[in-house]
């Protein structure tokens, strides 16, 4: 063998040896588990376009099977509200839910789901993706060893279902209502007896008179629960959840083991589901709303202005209390509302005029 040929052969063999480990790393398959705060058959949250199971399928397809995620609805692997802790501990790699479920761990989490009288779908995405919101989201979750990702949105929600008409703030006194999160604290200040019930218990509680009113999501999902059969007054303003974000919280140690291309796939699949899920809500809510009003005798209307003003006042008080207690809450609050103040003039001129003039 000539010296030149021998040298060429040696160099080729060396290159192959060096490249081999990189090829092996690139083909590594990751098998993860995702739990959820919602049942395995819950529309929007667990099944359907943009749902948790859809997210898992998209990630597996986009990664050509290199990242496989087994989805478990609430109760299939662990109870509904234990997924956050399970992902934090590394028992599972991911948990699907809403950040405001974890306000008992950090009140700042509320801002990454929905803030009363806050940003709409376009606005919350502007703050999260381009206004510093995602960085603050990560800062809040750092102490839990989690990496949060935005992966869904219901858009504006409905105030809820009431067995009796609401004419003034006095009608809230002694009212028994199923309402979670920050909105529940606000209602309590107006005399509401707040009850925390899982979705499956809302209908029987309303039917038996255990509660007088209930909030869930919007026309399509509310109709699935049958709430229109036991309460005819359907109020709106969306004051409490102007755009409700879904999240996946990923165990940070597991996330750090993913190569950059798989991380990019997760990020893009989550962003896709964020948009797709909200689009699903818009289409299905429009159809369900028409059915509820035209065919099922539902009376849909906004809350009286005086009631909305009282809710706004109490919301400000509740937020002020939280801000005074925690510097991180103040940091997130200041960022959120600074963005909202800049966003208001633009959305009033664009979306606001569209709704008042084009859709009038």
Image (cartoon, rainbow, N blue to C red):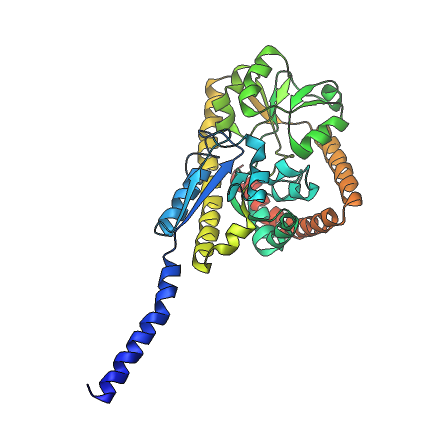
Placement of 172 over or under 93, stated as above or below: above
Left or right, 80 with respect to 14, comes to right
Is residue 305 visible in the rendered image? The answer is no
> x%, y% of residue 7?
28, 84
Is residue 101 visible in the rendered image? The answer is yes
The residue furthest top is 208
> x%, y% of residue 51?
45, 38
In terms of depth relative to the viewer, which is nearer, 324 or 12?
Answer: 12
In terms of depth relative to the viewer, which is nearer, 293 or 80?
Answer: 80
Placement of 91 over or under 285, stated as above or below: below
Left or right, 24 with respect to 225, comes to left
> x%, y% of residue 155?
54, 39
Placement of 345 over or under 215, stated as above or below: below
Quadrant assignment for the N terminus: bottom left
Residue 212: quarter of image:
top right
Left or right, 219 with respect to 101, comes to left
So how many labels did they put on this image? 0
The residue furthest front is 1
> x%, y% of residue 173?
75, 20
Residue 87: quarter of image:
top right
The residue furthest left is 1
Quadrant assignment for the C terminus: top right
């Amino acid at each position: 063998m000539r010296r030149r040929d021998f040298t060429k052969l040696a160099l080729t063999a060396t290159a192959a040896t060096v490249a081999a480990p990189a090829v092996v790393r690139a083909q590594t398959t990751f098998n993860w588990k995702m739990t959820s705060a919602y049942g395995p058959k819950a529309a929007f949250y667990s099944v359907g376009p943009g749902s948790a199971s859809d997210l898992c399928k998209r990630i597996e397809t986009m990664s050509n099977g290199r990242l496989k995620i087994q989805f478990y609805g609430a109760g299939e692997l662990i109870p509904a509200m234990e997924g956050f802790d399970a992902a934090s501990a590394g028992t599972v790699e991911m948990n699907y839910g809403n950040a405001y479920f974890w306000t008992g761990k950090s009140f700042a989490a509320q801002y990454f789901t929905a803030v009363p009288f806050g940003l709409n779908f376009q606005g919350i995405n502007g703050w999260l993706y381009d206004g510093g919101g995602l960085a603050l989201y990560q800062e809040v979750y750092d102490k839990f060893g989690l990496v949060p990702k935005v992966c869904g949105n219901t858009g504006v929600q409905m105030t809820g279902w009431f067995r009796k008409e609401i004419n003034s703030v006095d009608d809230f006194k002694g009212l028994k209502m199923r309402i979670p999160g920050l909105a529940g604290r606000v209602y309590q200040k107006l005399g509401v007896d707040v009850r925390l019930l899982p979705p499956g218990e809302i209908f029987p509680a309303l039917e038996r008179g255990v509660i007088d009113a209930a909030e869930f999501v919007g026309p399509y999902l509310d109709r699935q629960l049958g709430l229109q059969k036991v309460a005819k007054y359907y109020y709106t303003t969306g004051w409490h959840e102007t755009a409700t974000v879904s999240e996946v919280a990923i165990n940070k140690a597991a996330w750090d083991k993913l190569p950059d291309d798989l991380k990019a796939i997760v990020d893009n699949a989550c962003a896709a589901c964020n948009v797709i899920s909200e689009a699903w809500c818009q289409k299905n809510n429009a159809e369900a709303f028409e059915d509820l009003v035209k065919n099922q005798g539902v009376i849909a209307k906004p809350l009286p202005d005086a009631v909305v003003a009282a809710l706004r006042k109490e919301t400000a008080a509740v937020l002020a209390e939280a801000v005074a207690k925690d510097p991180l809450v103040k940091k997130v609050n200041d960022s959120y509302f600074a963005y909202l103040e800049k966003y208001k003039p633009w959305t009033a001129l664009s979306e606001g005029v569209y709704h008042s003039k084009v859709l009038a």
